[in-house]
Image: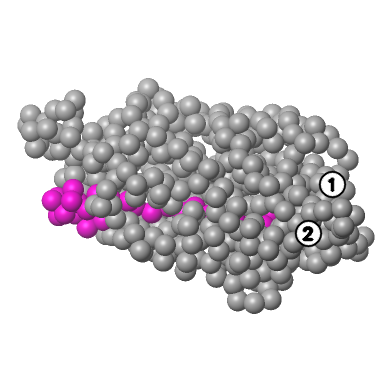
Amino acid sequence: MHSPSRRRMLVAAVTAGAASLVLAACTGGTTLADPGSDGSTGDAGATTVTFRLWDDVAAPAYAESFDAFSAAHPDLRVQVEVVPRGEYADRLREDMTDGDMADVFWATPTMYPAYAAAGDLVEVGADPDEAVWERSVVDLFTYRGTLWGVPQLWDSVALYYNEPLVAAADVDPSRLAWTPGGGAGDTLQAASRALTVDTTGRHPGEAGFDPGATQSYGFNAGADLFAIVLPFLAQNGVRFRDGQEFTFATPDGEAAFQYLVDLVRAQVAPPAAQDGARDGADAGPARDLFTHGRLALFQSSSQDLRTLVQDAGPGLRIAPMVAGPQGRPGVLTGVAAVGNAHSAHDGATREVLRWLGSADGQAALASQGVGVPAVAGAQEAYAEYWAARGVDVQPFLDAAREPGAPAPAAIGVDAGIAAVQPVLDRMFRGEIPVPEAVAQAQQAGNAALATPSPEP
C-alpha cells in the first residue's frame, strides 16, 4: 500500500444550487483554484485527468459535463473510463495497490471507508450548506466525522405499479400499508390477494386457484435488501445495523421478516426461487415479471426507472413505498466522486472534483435523467426530464426527505452482508423458520464483521 499524502477539501456554498470547493493540504498548501500547483499544466499541453465509473448510461452524460468543464478550463481534459460493475471492486483494489487507479472515481457507501482509513482518498472536510447537496447523501459519505467524496447521484425507494392491473382490482397504491401479522390497518395483504390471479381468473384462497399457473402476482416480497428488507425493518422500528454490529434479530425484526415470508407462502408474491434481487442494483426476475405485466406492485429503487420506462410500457406509474407501523422510512444510497490521494495531478484532480460538486457539473446527469443529482439545484431538471416522458418521479424525491434508516457503510460491511444474504434466501425459500433464520443471519454477519478484512 502506498504511503498516503493527506489532503483536505473545504466546501462552501457560493450560489444557489452550486458548490465552491476549496482543497488544501493539511499543512496549508494550495487551493482548488490553483490547478497548476502540481506542475502538471502549462505550455507543454493540456493535463488529462482520468475519471472511472461503472455505468454505461451515466458515461455519456459525464462526457457532456466534462466537455463543458474543458471549455472553461482549456488546459484540462477528463478521460472517462467505464469498468463493468462486476469487476469494479476488484479492479479498484488492484489498481490502487499498483498505483494505476484513476484520479477521480465513483464509490459507494460500502466501498469507500476502507480506502479512507488507509489514506488513499482525498479528504472533504467541512460539511456543505444543505441547500447545495442533499444532506442525506452527505451523511452516506461521512466516515469518522469527515466527508470523503463529492456526492453525485442517489437512489431512493418507491412503489412502481402497473396501472391497468391495479385499476382492474380497485386497489389504491398510495394507501397501501402493512402491520405485523396483518392486523388492524393492514391493506397490503388484501391488495396483494386481489392483484394475484391465475390463468382462469382465480385468486389465492379461492377454490381451484392454481399457483403453478399464476398470471400475475401482487407484490415483490423477497430478499431484496435495499428495496424490501431494510425499509420493512425500519418501518417496524428495527435497525439493521447499529455501530459495528448487525442488530436486526429482535422480536420486531422477526415480525417484519415473518410478514414478508408469509406473503410468499400465501402465494401473492413471487416464489423465492424467482426473486433474485439483492441490493437494488439488480432487481432480477421480480423486475422481469413487472416489465412483462406479471407483477402488479414492484417496490424498488429509482435506479430501475430507466429500464422500467423502456420495458414496462405506458401503464407504469409510481407511488410512495408501502407504509409500515412507523410510516415510510426507507434507506437511501448513492454514489460519490472520490479523489485519489496518490494522483500525479493533484491540482487538476481538485479542479475536477470542484466541478463535479456544482450544479453545472451535474446538469448533464439531470437533463439526461441518469439519476437523482445530489446537488439540490439540479433536481428540477431531472424531474422535468421524466415528466416529459409521462413519469412523475416526485415519490423518489420525497423519499429522501423522510427520516430513514442509516445505510450500511463501514469497513467490512460488504463481507457481513454477503454472510447474511444466503441465510435470508433460505428463509424465504422456507428452508429455515423465521426466528431461527434471523438469529443465524445476524450471527453470520457479525462473525464476518469481526474477521479482519484484507488490505484494500
Separation of residues labelled 2 and 1 (CA atoms): 16 Å
> Where residue 286 sits: x, y (%)?
34, 37
Could you say whether the residue bearing mark 2 is in a helix, strand or loop? loop
- Please name the amino acid that badge 1 sits on: Ala
Question: Would you name the residue on which mark 2 appears?
Answer: 75
Question: Would you name the residue on which mark 1 appears?
Answer: 344
The region drawn magenta spans 149-173
Q: Residues within 10 Å of mark 1 (few under 14, many from 20)?
A: some
Instruction: Give the left or right position of residue 118, taking residue 432 as reference.
Output: right
Instruction: Give the left or right position of residue 371, taking residue 428 as reference.
Output: right
> Where residue 234 sits: x, y (%)?
46, 51
423 over 162 or under it: above or below? above
Residue, far bottom: 15
The answer to if 166 sits in the magenta stretch is yes
Q: Quadrant of residue 267?
A: top left
Closest to the observer, 449 or 288: 288
Closest to the observer, 380 or 432: 380
Residue drawn at (55%, 29%), measured in percent from left and top? 419
316 over 414 or under it: above or below? below
Q: Is residue 17 visible?
A: yes
